[in-house]
Every structure is written in C-alpha cells, then in structure tokens.
Amino acid sequence: MSDEQLASTQSGRRPSGRDAKRAARAARAGTIIPYITRKVPYYEVVSEEGLSLLEHNADTILEEVGIDFRDDPEALEILKAGGAQVKGERVHFPRGLARSIIQKSAPREFTQHARNPARNVVIGGKNTVFAPAYGSPFIRNIDEGRRYARIEDFQNFVKLAYLAPSLHHSGGTICEPVDLPVNKRHLDMVYAHLKYSDKPFMGSVTAPERAADSVEMAKIVFGDGFMDPLTGRPKTAIINLINVNSPMTYDSTMLGAAKVYARANQATIITPFILAGAMSPVTVGGTVAQTLAEALAGMAFVQLVNPGAPVVMGSFASSISMQSGAPTFGTPEPALVLYTMAALARRLGVPFRSGGSLCASKIADAQAAFESANTLIPTCLAGVNFVLHTAGWLEGGLSMGYEKFVMDCDQAGMMHTLLAGVDLTENGQALSAIRDVGPGKHFLGCDHTQANFENAFYRSPLADNNSFEQWDAEGRLDMAQRANASWKKQLAEYEAPEIDPAVDEALLAYIQKRKDSEPDSNV
C-alpha cells in the first residue's frame, strides 16, 4: 500500500477511484514474468534440404578436419572412450557420432532454479529468457564517460537487472570489476548475484576452481533443496558460458570449467565465438557449418562427462570490416547465421543461445539503437531460448553502458508483446466495440476501450511522445538523458530481495575462507 493510500485509510477516507487505479498499476508492475513463451511462428530462412546440407558439412569438418582439445589429457581420454579418434590433441568424430551422443542424453529443455522459485526459468522449447550483457572491462555513462569497471558497477547492474521486469535473468560477468584481484573477484561477483537479486545467475568460468566456488556458493544458498529427490541429481541452479576458441579449438580453461559444471549437473552454453572473415570463412554457409561443428564437439564432450547434464547450443557470430578488421554488428549476414543456427538447434533437439542487443557504437546514440534493434528482432523471430547481451552492450562488448542498459530493457519489454502474438479471444476480436460505436464515431469513450486502455498498448518508460511544446518546456531531453535519470532513480529506490541472514552469513564466511587461502593475483 502506498503512503497516500495508507494515509487515506488511517483518516477514515475511502480510497478514490484514482487511488484504486494507481494500486492496480503498481500490482501489475510487480507481477513476475519469469520468461517468455512465444505464440508466434519461427522465421525460417533455409529450406530443409539446405539445413541437411549444412549438417552434412559440419560432420565433414568433424570427421576430416577435427577439433583441437588442448592441454587436457583427461578430456582426450573421455573423448576417446566415447568413440572419437584422438591424434595428439586433434580429435576426429566419425560422421554422426557427436550428434548421436547429444541426442541420446541431452535434455530438450530444462529448468534453471532461482533462489526465489517464482523466478525459475525454463530454457528450451518455445521459451525465451533475456539476460544482461556479459564481459565488459569498461563502463560508460553520461556523467563520467568511459572508465574501467569496479565492483560497485557490477553490483549496480545486478540491481538494475533485478528491477527490470523485461529481464528474466541476472546474467554473469555483467562487467569486469578490475579493482579486485583476478583470482578472487569471482567470489564477489557471484555473491552480488545471490545477494542483490533473486533471479537465476551465471557462474564463473575463468578457472576450474572458480567454477567449483560458484557451485559451492549455490549449494549454500539452496541448502537441502540443492538435490532433486525425484532424480537424485543436483538441481540446475547455474548456467555457464563455455566459449570455443574459434577456429575449432577448445582450451584447458574452458574444458576444466565445463567438466566442473557438467559433473555437478549445472548447465553449460557451448558457444563458438566467431568474427566471420577472421575466425571462420566470410560466407554465411561456411560460418554456419563451422559453428555447428564446434558446438557439436563441445556438447558431445559434456554429455560424455555426465550424460543428461543440460547443454545449450550457442552461436555468437558477427562480421568484420574488410577494410579495418574491426567487428561490425547489426548487419544482415550475422542475422542469417542466427536464423539458420536456431533452426539447426531445433533439429538437433537442444536449447539455443544467441543474439542480444549488439552494436559497435561507443555511446548510446542512433547507431547503437539501430544496430541493437537489427540484432534483437532477429533474435526474437528466430526463437532464441537464452539471450545473452540483451541489455547494456556498447563498443563491441568492451563497454557496459548505464543509459544503454535501461534503453535496451525498454526494447526487451516490447519483445514480450511481439512474441505474445495476436489476441483472438472475444476481447481481442473487439466485435462488441465495433457494434457499439458504428460508422463515423470514435472509440475513445466506448466500454471496450475503457476496459482495456491501461494495457492496450506497450507503454515505453523512456520514449517521449508529447508535443514539441511540452518536450521543450521539460528541458528538451533526448533518450539518453532520460535514460540517465531513469537508472539513477532506480538505484536510489532499489530494495534488495530478502535473504536468510544465516545463508548470507554462510556465504560471507565461505568467501572469506577462500580469499584467505591464497595471495592476491592478477592471473
């Protein structure tokens, strides 16, 4: 109840109709939407024959060219025992082997559990989960410009993601807090996700022992509920990003983290990281075949480590400027890769990760807006299940933008409406309104409009649709300036979700013990 409503009640005055409407709006704003379930068809760009050809080409790469698994003898032994041909660190998969391993045990969809069960997300099927951007060493805002990220920034973005109804996930390395030692900062990052949000989160992958810390901290939070009594396996409480060192190489860091998470039944997103023209051929077809081959190898490895462990097929493919070599975003070719890879994931029967709100712009300007839109819309139309980099991405991922974050959250909110499709219920058909109004009149005052006006259309919290005169009188603020005011207001009004004090104390004790166990290091 608001202060105004409370005062009305205490004074014996009944809440007015305006009070009731305000309370209803607040209740709707507080409604949790854990994830999107799409009600529109997928957008397809390649025929069944074409998809079969690309699958054949991926198997050719796996069989004839092979994938390097570097500096991890255990991984090579696991792959050899699974039927792969190992020659030094080069692994060749007989045609169809990787696919058969994956399809034998990998789940088509799975639940990632949050510490607040209302925030659980189902990844796969017709579901879409939006998560923030990931991995930026810098932040940017209007007030300070560009600077290195600090742990305070990391905490701020976790809070903003928690407050954003259009985001379903807390994300992972939202920005890289360079003010903390490399070998210990993961502890503070995971703690921030668990303390300042109750949405699901991503763990650390920068070393196997850091992955193990992430699992242990999740165990502390979930307690006895960490194990699923129905399956006898741990619940999936963490999802994690395992990047391929494209072209066609897995390193020991990623393999080590993948083993830790797979053995704990935690989810891994196996993602080839490709800038086409540098790490793959310049063509869409060549990039797709290589991406599929790399992802198949990694997902098969995870299933050999622990059959049934959740895996997500990832694709991060962008293009480069052939003049400068710089990454480019929001261009047509990566969108075609995205559409094609989404279709291939559905054929394989695993969830798919790609897309986001990607741009090369350094600031939250028109270039950032159109490049991000040109990535986010294909993401949603293609049917991506887990969308990393939904909010905040600037400068090809080097910067996390405060203003860009809230602008992207606004766009993500619009995608909820788009993916909900067309309402064809009796209310959606609105024949009663058409009969009541008839020719030559307007619909503004009819009963149907009055009953639906609150939720009839998506209402942007940032866009200015007022007259020029009103915009002029209110300070002529552009979108970035309005976003600047928005994120500051959100952080000022932020209230942390409840956490059991004993759990919080146990987390802090674990963190301190781990920090005391080794000296600071920036490696």
Image: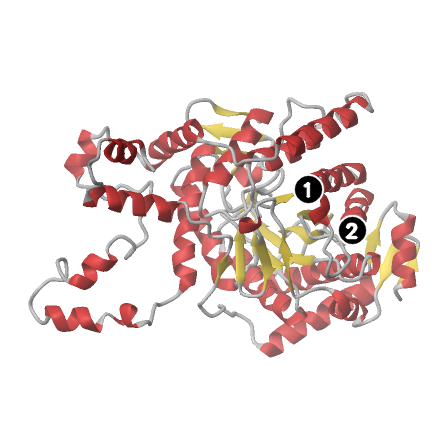
Q: Which amino acid does label 1 sit on?
A: Gly
Question: Horizontal placement of 53 versus 67: left or right?
Answer: left
Numbered label attached to residue 249: 2
Question: Horizontal placement of 213 versus 10: left or right?
Answer: right
Vertical comparison of 28 with 472: above or below: below
Vertical comparison of 99 with 35: above or below: below
The residue sitting at 74% across, 42% down in the picture is 215
Q: What element carries label 1?
A: loop
Question: Whole-percent x and y of residue 205?
Answer: 73, 41
Do we see residue 242 in this rendering?
no
Which callout, 1 or 2, points at the residue further toward the start of the chain?
1
The residue sitting at 45% across, 67% down in the picture is 39
Q: Quadrant of residue 77?
A: bottom right
Question: Which is closer to the viewer, label 1 or label 2?
Answer: 1
How dense is the environment of label 2, judged by Cα within 10 Å: few (below 14), some, or many (20 and up)? some
Question: Whole-percent x and y of residue 227?
Answer: 74, 51
How dense is the environment of label 1, judged by Cα within 10 Å: few (below 14), some, or many (20 and up)? many
Q: Mark 1 points at which residue?
A: 203
Distance between the Cα atoms at labels 1 and 2? 22 Å
Q: Which residue lies furthest to the left in this view?
A: 440
The residue sitting at 64% across, 71% down in the picture is 347
Q: Quadrant of the N terminus?
A: top left
Q: Is mark 2 on a helix, strand or loop?
A: strand
Q: Which amino acid does label 2 sit on?
A: Thr
The residue sitting at 85% across, 47% down in the picture is 70
Question: Whole-percent x and y of residue 184?
Answer: 73, 27
Do we see residue 193 in this rendering?
yes
